[in-house]
Structures are given as C-alpha cells and as structure tokens.
Image (tube, rainbow, N blue to C red):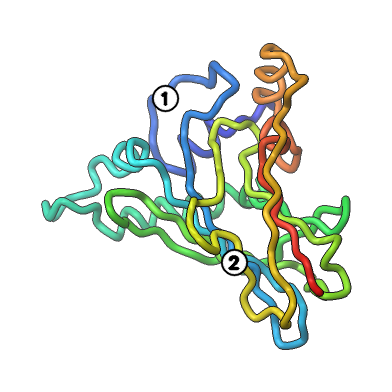
Amino acid sequence: MIRCVLTILTLALLGMGGWARLAEAHPHVWIDATAVLSVNEAGQWTGVTVTWTFDEFYSQASVEGFDEDGDGLPDQAPLDAMFNEALENLREWIYFTDARLGDKRLAWGDGATGGASWVDGRLVYRFVLPLAEPVDLVAHAKEISLRLYDPTFYISILLAEQPNAASLKGAPPGCKVTVFEPEGARDMTFDDAIAISEDVQPGEEGLGFPYAQKIGVQCD
C-alpha cells in the first residue's frame, strides 16, 4: 500500500484533517531542528535528543481549537495527545531520524520519550531516542552519521540557524560534531521526484535523503 508523509504526518502525526493529497515534490512544512548526541561515561554514543520547531503558519493551523480556556495559548492536554500520537506513528518511519555506522542503519531502541510545547507562537516537539545498541564514539567516530529528514520531502527538516544546533553531550575531550550540507537530487527529473515521494515505504530513504544535512563526528 502506498504510504506518504501527507497521511502519516499531516493527518495522524499532527492530528489534522481535510488536507489535499501530495501534489508536488517539494516541502510544504518547514522544521527548524536541533540534535544533541548523548554519550555515556564509557564513551559510548547512546542516543539523540531531537527538537523540531515547526514553521509559524503550520504551527497555528495545527493547534486550531486547542485553546478552550481562552488564554490565547494552546492547552497542554491536546498538545500532549497530539504528540503521543505522533510518537507512535513515527516509530515505523524511524522518527525521521536516520542514524548510521558506515552504510549500516542503526536501530532505535524501545523507550522513546518526549513532549510538545508552544514557544513564541510555534509548535515544538522534542524526542529522546535511545539507540538499541550503544556505539563506541572514539573508535567509530569516522563512521558515525545522523540525518534528520522526511523521506517524501513533504516536510523540510533543517538544523536551526543557531550555534550548536548539532552537538555532543558527555563526549570525551577532542570530539565534536561536523555538519555537511546536502547536494540535493540534482540529476532527478520532476516526474521522477514525484513518483519517488508518492511511493516511499517506511524505512526507505526516498526523496528526502539527498536533501538531508549529514551530522558527523570527529575525534582527535
């Protein structure tokens, strides 16, 4: 069955209905993201905390009807319900968070947590994702990579334009993250892009992969 992020994200993840089917292979929703890679005392990469800040237009649309107390802000209870549904629906899509060791995709473990909040007129989601198996950071630094992307490219997820949008927490001295900008699908035709975005299945790279920033790790 054809699955696309319009169904998974717009209808189920954000709890909205009545949206038209994906018609063009370019983003319709924009997210400013941050990523903090967590390292334990043994020097192992154990997981990542990802924060999504949605664009203002989409944020306002997604919380329509959430202000029952009339204070001008969305109530926390419906935000929590929307986030919990998002967390469940995103599981098979690897939370739009692709961790790899070389060419091998790493699995996320059980126990993903997080929450939703409303900050300066924008919807914010925060995910804490544990790796199924920790990775020795120093020994495998050159092989580690992390990408945040929607495989259909309906949603653009880019690191926020702020210091330390990608960072390490608890890493040994001499280790740091490096962000590599994407080249994009430059040789892909428009029709091919639409076909790919419509037919993406959970776990596939899809159209979003070549447009994703790559977060790498360097250790001296």
Name the kind of residue labelled 2 in the image.
Val
Closer-to-camera residue (77/158): 158
Side of 70 where 134 appears, left or right? right
Going by the image, does 67 lie left or right of 99?
left
In terms of depth relative to the viewer, which is nearer, 217 or 50? 217
Where residue 101 appears, as percent x and y from the top left, is 84, 59
Give the SS element for disc 2: strand
The quadrant the C terminus occupies is bottom right
Task: Indicate whether 140 appears above or below 67.
Answer: below
Q: Estimate the x, y position of residue 127 in percent, counting from the top left.
A: 53, 61
Q: Quadrant of residue 1?
A: top right
Quarter of the image where one finds residue 8: top right
Residues packed near mark 2 inside 10 Å, few (<14), some (14 to 19) or many (20 plus)? some
What residue is drawn where x is 45% and y is 20%? 20
The number of numbered discs placed on residues in the rendered structure image is 2
The earlier-in-sequence mark between 1 and 2 is 1
Checking the image for residue 78, the label placed there is none
Location of mark 1 (residue): 19
Q: Farthest residue toward the top?
A: 191
* Tag of residue 36: 2
Q: Is residue 97 left or right of residue 10?
A: right
